[in-house]
Amino acid sequence: MEKPAIAGGTPVRNTKLYYGHQFIDEADVKAVEAVLTSDYLTCGPKVVELEKRLCELTGAKYAVAVSNGTAALHIAAMAAGVGDGDELITTPITFAASANCALYCGGRPVFADIDPNTYNIDPECVREKITDRTKAVVAVDFTGQAVPLDALLDICHDRKITLIEDGAHSIGTKYKGKPVGSIADMTTFSFHPVKTVTGGEGGAVLTNREDLYEKLLLYRSHGITKEEAFYVNESHGPWYHEQIDLGYNYRITDIQCALILSQMDKLAQFAGRRRAIVERYNNAFLQIPQLFVQQEIPESDTTRHLYILRIRPELLTIDRKGFFEAMAAENICCNVHYIPVYWHPYYQKLGYKKGICPNAEKLYEEMMSLPIYYSLTDQDVDDVIMAVRKIVEYYKK
Ligand SMILES: Cc1ncc(COP(=O)(O)O)c(C=O)c1O
C-alpha cells in the first residue's frame, strides 16, 4: 500500500481536531428537558414558536418546520410543481439532497456549473441549462455565502421558474442587507449537528407566498387538512379531516424545536465566532501563493458554515489526497464538501457523464474543508494554520 503523505517531524497537535462540532450548553439541555415533561412531544407549541422565530429572523411571511433539510427540499420541489419529466437545475457542489429532491418527484436534476471564485452556482450557466421542462432552480448558498439572488430571480421569474434557495449552510446570512429566507420563492434550512444551529435533525421551508405555504403544510403531513375551506366533502363533525393530496410524515418534534430555539438564542454569538475564524484563516492563507482563497461575496454578509482550503497543485508536489493525508498526520481531520453529485454511482447509472461542469470538477480535485465551529479556540485555529504552512513548505515546488 502507498504510504500516506506526511510533512515530517512531530505533529503540530497531539489531540485530534475535527472539521465540525455542535455546541450544546446548559440552556439547551434545560429547554429540551422542559419539553420532555410537557404535554406535547410533537405537533405542539414549540413547533409554532420555532416557525414564528424563523419568520422574525428572516422577515419571511411563512415558515414550515420539518424533520430535516432533505424533507424541506422535497416538499419545496413538490410545491414548485416538479413532476414527471420536469427538470430542476442545481449545482454539483452540494450535498446530494439538493438534486435528489427532483428525483423524488419524478423529475430530472440538471447540473449547472459554478463560479470558479465564489464556488456558488453561476447564473449564466443556469440560463444556458433552461429548457421548456425547467420547473425549478435549487441554488445552494455554499459555505454560507448567499447566491446571486437578484440575477437568479430575474432569470427564473422571466420564465415562470420557481427559485428555491438551499440555505442549509446559510442561516443568519444576509444578501444586500436582507436575511436569506425572505428573498427566493422558497428557502430551505437544515438543523443537522454540523450546521450553525442544530436540533439533532431538523429543517424548515420559508416563503412569502401563501399558495406555496398551503401546499407545504399539506405535504408535511400526509396531504391531510383540517381547514374546512379546503374540504372536498361536507364535514362529518368536529373530528373531521380530509386527505386531499399525497404527502408524507415529515413532521418535526417539539423536542427538536426546543433545542433549535435555544440554539437560535446564540446565533449572533455563533455567527461572530465563525466570522472571526474565517478572517484568521483568510489573513494567513492570502500570504501563501500555493493556496487559493475562496472569494468573499461583497453582497453577502455571511454566517460561514464551511471553510474551504483550496490548494494549487501546479505549485506543489502533492495533490489534494496527499495534502488531506498530511493534515490528518498533523491530527487535523478535514473533510471534502463535495464530491460532484453526478459523479456518484447512482447518478452515473442514470446516464450523467463526467465533464459536464468543469469548474466544479476542478474545485473538487483541489479542495478540503478545514475545522470551523463555535468552540474552536484561537490556538486551535493557529494549529490548523501552522499545519497548512508546514505542509506547503515541505511539498512546495
Ligand atoms: C447543501 C445541503 N443541502 C441539503 C442538506 C440536507 O439537510 P439534512 O441533512 O438536514 O437532511 C444538507 C445537509 O447536509 C446540505 O449541506
Image (cartoon, helix red, strand yellow):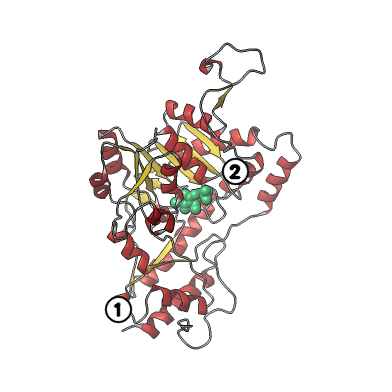
- At a point 38% along the width and 38% down the height, the residue shown is 183
Q: Whole-percent x and y of residue 360? A: 32, 59
Question: Quarter holding the C terminus?
Answer: bottom left
Q: Is residue 385 left or right of residue 128?
A: right
- At a point 36% along the width and 69% down the height, the residue shown is 366
Q: Whole-percent x and y of residue 385? A: 45, 74
Q: Are marks 1 and 2 in contact (CB under 8 Å)?
A: no
Q: As shown in the figure, which amino acid type bears the numbered disc 2? A: Leu
Residue most extreme to the bottom: 9
Q: Nearer the viewer, residue 60 or 94?
A: 94
Is residue 174 in view from this perspective? yes
- At a point 44% along the width and 37% down the height, the residue shown is 76
Q: Label 1: state its secondary structure.
A: helix
Q: Whole-percent x and y of residue 54? A: 51, 39
Q: How many numbered markers are drawn?
A: 2
Q: Is residue 282 above or below residue 64?
A: below
Badge 2: residue crowd in 10 Å (few <14, some 14–19, many ≥20): many
- Which of label 1 and label 2 is nearer to you? 1
Q: Nearer the viewer, residue 54 or 254?
A: 254
* Mark 2 sits near ligand 1, with its Cβ under 8 Å away: no
Is residue 93 in view from this perspective? no
Q: Earlier in the sequence, mark 1 or mark 2?
A: 2
For the residues labelled 1 and 2, the Cα–Cα distance comes to 46 Å
Q: Nearer the viewer, residue 132 or 58?
A: 132
Q: Which mark is residue 49?
A: none
Q: Label 2: state its secondary structure.
A: helix
Q: As shown in the figure, which amino acid type bears the numbered disc 1? A: Leu
Q: Which residue is mark 2?
A: 261
Q: Give residue 155's quadrant in the image.
A: top left
Q: Which residue is mark 1?
A: 315
Q: Is residue 147 left or right of residue 40?
A: left
- At a point 46% along the width and 39% down the height, the residue shown is 58
